[in-house]
Image (cartoon, coloured by chain):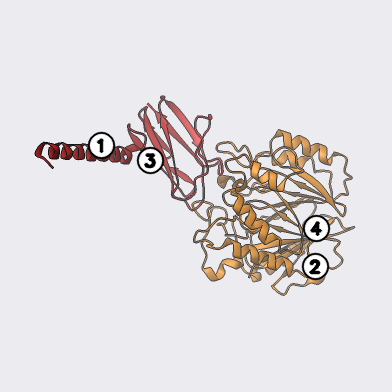
Amino acid sequence: MKGQAKMAAIAALITLLAILAGAGRLKADDGKGGGPTADVKIDNFSFTPQSITVAAGTTVTWTNRDDIPHTVVSNDGVFKSKVRDTDETFSYTFTKPGTFEYFCSVHPKMTGKVVVQ
Amino acid sequence: MTNKLRGSGLIDERMDELNQDGIDRRGFLECMAWVGTGLIWTVSGGIPVSKAFAKTHDQSVLKGGELTFAQISDSHMGFNKPANPDVAATLQAAVDRINGLATPPEFLLHTGDISHLSRPEQFDNVDQILKGAKAKDVFFVPGEHDVLDDNGKTYRDRYAKNSQGDGWYSFDKKGVHFIGLVNVMNLKAGGLGALGPEQLEWMEKDVKHLKSSTPIVVFAHIPLWSVYPEWGWGTQDSEQALSYLKKFGSVTVLNGHIHQTMQKVEGNVIFHTAMSTAFPQPAPGKADSPGPMKVPAEQLRSVLGITDVNYVQGTHSLAVVDSNLG
């Protein structure tokens, strides 16, 4: 390959790699293409932390570490997960401020709260 | 309610106590949980008479019975965690146990959590295994694991074709009136099981014109009495349902959900919960949460089981017998 073409090819390759790496990095960060994240663990029939406070625009991810399936259902119909078995997750991005109480519709004694500021 | 009784020695003592005291119409027994030993309860004229029996149980107590059916519960088809990696095998063992009963049951009641995740293949598996039961008719009520994601549509299409609302219905067998209730739908945050006004209205009408001498059997998944509200083991509006049954001389309430046997007698009403065929759960308050309880593998079948119910016509009594799977 002639010098200039070689440089162009390398540049293109570097750009391509940068794009791929960038895309990969974004995915690993939040899965939603940007914004802060927070995590809630589901285990022993509880949501932990039971109450979290996050900034508007945060994506909260619930991960079920229990050996029983659970759901994450907003008291006010704002969000509703499908049933989540062990190791499955549910994510919701809170765009508006407010207090969002939720529970597990399978085991309604399990309750939690997301406060969005 | 603490679980004080383990082993047939203590149970025999307790039984002697009760037989000597007698329990009058208004009395009630503390809820009792027992593991590995069957107990026959017969209520005659409001006075429970009990006989404890071991594995080679005395079937003569049940002779002359006119109606026999069996209850199974909480098969959780699809569950595969350490508490029981093979729930299909233990359900099969339950069917074998049913088929081995001296008086084969005419039909089965399944008090819910048939599947673990409401998946069609899980329901299919249970149906397949139950085909091997000598009793061909099975009457179901759903557990909370059977109505996931689709508000119970899959469940109703399969098991509640002739039902009302969320899947409640009633039927009669040999003069006994059976009522299948659904208390696992539309549960509210922080709440317990719930029947809802529509179902309660239906139930009131359903029993209104029955003679008070008609024995009643109510079956539903979550206990219709307050076993342990902290764990959701109760039904918010069950009092109202039970108020419609006040006139009846014999009411038997059969539930599941808690994966252990418990029994309470209150006036004319016997409340009874069945063991699971899949995995046990801890006694109320004995663990952080009501999840699956691991026991040594060789003990698993001793904490799983079926319930055999025998109705002796003319005495308005139902004999309720639990037996484990081995």
Residue bearing mark 3: A39
Q: Which mark is residue A19?
A: 1
Which mark is in front, 3 or 1?
1
- Report the chain shown in red: A
- The residue closer to the viewer here, B24 or B194, is B194
Is A56 left, or right, of B38 in this rendering? left
Query: Considering the numbered disc 1 on the image, is that residue within a helix, a strand or a loop?
Result: helix
Residue bearing mark 2: B103
Q: Where B187 falls versus B105 (above or below)?
A: above
Task: Kindly report the distance in space between the C-alpha atoms of the residues bearing marks 2 and 3.
Answer: 55 Å
Task: Kindly report the distance in space between the C-alpha atoms of the residues bearing marks 1 and 4.
Answer: 74 Å
Q: Are marks 2 and 4 on the same chain?
A: yes
Q: Which mark is residue B318?
A: 4
On the image, the x and y values in percent for residue B212 come to 87, 46
Task: Kindly report the distance in space between the C-alpha atoms of the residues bearing marks 4 and 3.
Answer: 52 Å
- Report the chain shown in orange: B
